[in-house]
Amino acid sequence: MNKKILVSLFIILLISGLIGGVALAGEDLQIERFYGSTRIETAIEISKAGWDKADTVILARSDDFPDAMAGSPLAFSKDAPILLTLPDRLPSEVLEEMSRLGAEDVIILGGTRAISSSIETDLKKMDINTERIGGANRFETAKLIADKLPHYDKAIITYGNNFPDALAIGPYAAQKGYPILLTETNSIPKDTAEALGSVTSSIVVGGEFVISSQVKNNLPSPVRIAGTDRYDTAVRIMDRLGFTADLIYIATGTDFADALTGSVLAAKENAPMLMVRNDSIPSL
């Protein structure tokens, strides 16, 4: 890994028990780990670490990523943690965390096939206001999330059929208020094109294997950030985008949940999100 990461950063927060025994060089590093026995509980621990109170909570499905991976900028704009739910039932521990936060509003990411309408009903019975942001597909959902953000003139473009690049850029996008919009490899979906209407510049995250030059060249003033793999891409994001914190967040790069829920907390610290394998740090 980049020597700067290991030597000059003094606090590293490891997210989730999925990362076991990862060795980090450097005697001055302090390591704090947020984790629970499940990804749902890990999200709660992250919420507890970052928020004493929150009027709004973002609710995402725990076992699937498409609707949620564009949610970090919206959560940051609302100063809201991202909590996770089962598709058809809101776990009691999530309800308890909402109560601890004093949440009055819950924004659900995804349609009723992703998160059941019965969850909305249960929340309303608790006098919690609900709003659902869900399109016909992940591309429309990302556009609808973008529509909820304050005015923006720059957008982040990531591959819509996998999660690593969107989650690695999540803290930066959130902190800057830039929407994360999704694309296919060789074509720009209609909803994404519409969301780009007022955008004057864009950051393309990922190499040509996931986002072709044809797509990149049809975006407004595009700049590409890409590494040899998801781990290298996350490091390049950190190196190029001017994070000011003296800490980094690390999450597993093999699943989406912990990086998603940790991204807003990282944004609050203006800190990057790096990814590792479950049992090793990739050599970059």
Image (cartoon, rainbow, N blue to C red):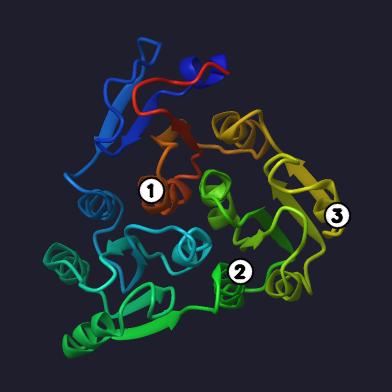
Residue to which mark 1 is pinned? 262
Query: Dot 1 lies on which element?
Result: helix
Residue type of the residue flagged with mark 1: Gly
Q: In this view, does 77 lie to the left or right of 140?
A: left
Residue, disc 2:
139
Question: What is the C-alpha distance between the residues marked 1 and 2?
Answer: 22 Å
Q: Is mark 3 on a helix, strand or loop?
A: loop
Q: Residue at x 51, y 22 (%)?
A: 5
Residue 105 at x, y = what percent?
Answer: 32, 80
Residue 192 on image: x %, y % = 70, 69
Residue depicted at x 81% and y 52%: 216
Gap in angstroms between the C-alphas marked 2 and 3:
21 Å
Q: Which residue is drawn at 79% across and 46% down?
A: 223
**Badge 2 element:** helix
Residue 252: x, y in percent?
39, 36
Indicate the quadrant where residue 10 lies.
top left
Residue named by callout 3 = 221
Vertical placement of residue 206 versus 158, above or below: above
Q: In this view, does 73 lie to the left or right of 109?
A: right
**Which is nearer the eye, 78 or 20?**
20
Q: Is 170 located above or below residue 150 in the figure?
A: above
Task: Please tell me whether mark 2 or mark 3 is closer to you in this view.
Answer: 2
The quadrant where residue 136 appears: bottom right
Q: Where is residue 71 in the image (x, y as percent from the top left)?
A: 48, 63
